[in-house]
Image (spheres, rainbow, N blue to C red):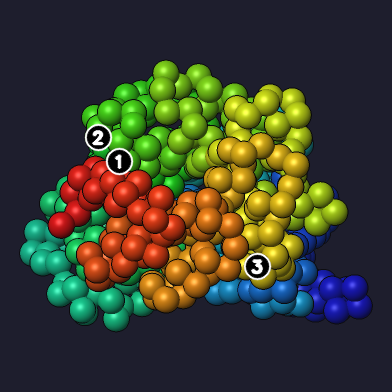
Amino acid sequence: MRHLITLCFVLFCFGIFTPAVGAHTETQVIKMVPGGFEPQEATIDENSAVIFVNQDTIGRWPASNNHPTHELYPEFDPKREIAPGESWAFKPKSIGGWKYHDHVNPHLRGVLTVLGEGKSEKVAEQSKSFSLKDRLRALFQSVKLFFSNLTYNAPAQEKFKKLAPEEQFEQLEKIAKVGGAGKGWAYLQDTYRGQAGSSGNIHDLAHLSGRLIFEDKGLSGISTCTSTFAFGCYHGLLDVAFSDSLEGLLTAEKECSKLGNPSSGPYGSCVHGIGHGVASYYDSRDLEKSLESCNTLSAGQAFCHDGVFMEFARGARGDFYLKVNPFYPCNTLETRFGGAYSVACGRNQPTIFISKFGMNFDQAAMNCVDNTLSKDFKVACVDALGFMLAGSKDTRSIISGCQSIGLDEYTANCLKAAAGELIFQDVPGWQQAAPEVCAASPVSAKTTCSQYLEKLIKDYGRS
């Protein structure tokens, strides 16, 4: 607190918070805590300022939407991570409601409303359009991009990998503008083929690709995305599509149906992405409304549920999950709704065991199989352990990890899930690794595992 007071004093002395004569000013402190921002929604007047204080144990980076380019309000961006214990001061100059996120973890979100002096909050909420200055800036950038595109050639892929993130974003936008957003997405997939994308700049680039596809094609572009790079393309597209409304939900599902029948992998991956978009619309705060929105789909509700739970596992507030009740919300949902959400919830609960509660793999595995919840939950929970083990890409580690569960039935589930994940993520060498993992299954499960791999190979066009 003493450091915060000193910071405020220094900023005031140097004129950063100096008010206009007669203006009402105050400083709004927003704490960056594990799992989110406190408060998540804040309102100030145009003469006030904000201080983002990092009370987390990792670096944080508050910045305006859209991720990852922050073009909604470019000045609302410190351009760097804020280290634990440090802070960033910002004095907004534009009236309106500004949605923002954590660039390091874009699932963490907030809203900063800036009121004009003497204006009510209701008026400010209705004033979310760009200022004339913002419009002119956007027009200038569009004209500049148009002329640069006339002679533009996409950089060699190895050169692209070495560019700074901001330069990569710029290049990807140019590729999309010249050849279409689908071409930009194809270029990105070719550049990082076989690499994981659950974090870091690859996932950010996939987010940007999804947004560019939406700007180019609207919701019809959802079938252009794929599950590559941890569903980043779907996330980026649906974050924009569902930013203010879920009216396009059924249209999005219709576009997913173009990828295959409701039992196919590509269809499931697409609707899974819809679940992420739905949860993002509710800011990962209202689980039941998110699940209810999924239930309005004509098919594939379970895939949508899975996306919702995954988004909550990544972006829900720190106090949503409690170590004293490690099976929440799965146990509560089973009590209220039977097994309607057991599979989707179970597939994401090991992430909570390990990332939120600090359990090791063996402890998480014990929680998956030694509980009073349904068999569906247990099988799905073990499947998720298999997905995690596949991330090592080492067949010996995968096999030993699954066998450590100690029960043949669940070991078989774990091995099958891990082998399938190697194909799904297109891990280099999966052609040998996936069958090798299946071969370690108990005798009674070998055929089922092999048939599952054959279906995935066909669904996703692997070769």
Of 49 and 34, nearer the camera is 34
Instruction: Assess whether mark 3 and mark 1 are in contact (beta carbons under 8 angstroms).
Output: no
Can you name the residue that lies furthest to the right here?
A: 2
**Residue 155 visible in the shown view:** yes
Q: Quadrant of residue 256?
A: top left
The relative height of residue 147 versus residue 129 in the rendered view (above or below) is below
* Picture coordinates of residue 422, whole percent (x, y): 34, 61
Instruction: Please state the horizontal and vertical placement of residue 222, each as a whole percent of the image.
Output: 31, 38
SS for tag 1? Answer: helix
Q: Which residue occupies the extreme front position in the image?
A: 443
Instruction: In the rendered view, tell whether residue 238 sits above or below residue 316.
Output: above
Q: Residues within 10 Å of mark 2 (few under 14, many from 20)?
A: many
State the residue position of label 2.
Answer: 259
Give the mark toward the camera: 1 or 3.
Answer: 3
Residue that carries the numbered disc 3 in the rendered image: 362
Q: Residue at x 42, y 28 (%)?
A: 300
Would you say residue 19 is visible in this rendering? Answer: no
Q: Position of residue 283 (x, y in %)?
A: 62, 42
Q: CA distance from mark 1 to mark 3?
A: 32 Å
Could you tell me the amino acid type at mark 3?
A: Asp
Q: CA distance from mark 3 to mark 2?
A: 38 Å
Q: Nearer the viewer, residue 216 or 197?
A: 197
Element type where label 3 sits in the image: helix
Mark toward the start of the polypeptide (2 vs 1) = 2
| Quarter of the figure that contains the N terminus | bottom right
Residue on which the image places disc 1: 266
Mark 1: amino acid: Pro
395 sits to left or right of 188: right
Name the N-terminal-most of marks 3 and 2. 2
Of residue 352 and residue 40, the one placed in the foreground of this image is 352
Q: Nearer the viewer, mark 3 or mark 2?
A: 3
